[in-house]
Image (spheres, rainbow, N blue to C red):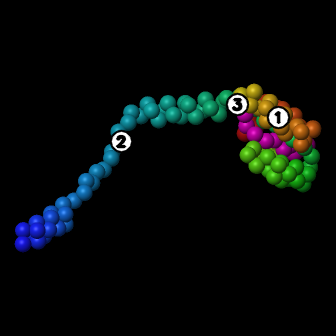
Amino acid sequence: MKILSSMVLFACFTHFSYSQGAKVNIQQDQKIDQLLEIYKSSLSNNEYFRIQVGFGDYAKAQRIKANVEEDFPDLSSKIDFDSPTYRVRVGRFISKLDAERKFNEVRIKYPDAMLLKPKKSTN
C-alpha cells in the first residue's frame, strides 16, 4: 500500500510540475550593428583575385562556364560582360597565394587561363 500511495503521489507531482520555460531577450548596443556594417563594407572592399578561363560571344561563354562547372565544381563561376565580349571567370581568392595555386590547376585544363585582379565593380 505504501508503494501504491508513493506511486500515486509521484504521478500527481509529475503531472502538475512544469518544466522550465524561458524567454531570451537580447539587449545589445546599437553600435554593434554599426560595427557589423563597417565590417561587411570592409570585406567587400578587399582586393581579390579571379581566374579568367575563356571569353567569346554569349553562347560560347555559356559552354565554357558549363565545362568549368563540370571540371571544377568547387569553384564559383560567373559570366561577366566586358564590351564587346563575355568573359568566364572563376573563384574569388583573397590571397594571391591561394589564387596562384588554383590557377596552376586550372591552367592544366584551360591553357589560355589568366589570373586577374578585376575592378571593384565586378563581383
Q: Is residue 83 covered in magenta?
A: yes
Q: Which mark is residue 26?
A: 2
> For the point 82% across and 34% down, which residue is it?
103
Q: Would you identify the image quadrant in which residue 99 lies?
A: top right
Find the magenta span and give its range: 81-93
* Pick the front one: 28 or 98: 98
Q: Earlier in the sequence, mark 1 or mark 3?
A: 3
On the image, numbered disc 3 is attached to which residue? 94
> For the point 60% across and 32% down, which residue is it?
41
On the image, numbered disc 1 is attached to which residue? 103
| Residue 3, image x, y percentages | 11, 68
Q: Earlier in the sequence, mark 1 or mark 2?
A: 2
* Pick the front one: 21 or 42: 21
Secondary structure beneath label 1: helix
Residue type, numbered disc 2: Ile
Secondary structure beneath label 2: loop
Which tag is nearer the camera, tag 1 or tag 2? 1
Characterize the local packing of mark 1: few (<14), some (14-19) or many (20 or more) Cα atoms within 10 angstroms: many
Left or right placement of residue 17 versus residue 57 in this view: left
Characterize the local packing of mark 3: few (<14), some (14-19) or many (20 or more) Cα atoms within 10 angstroms: some
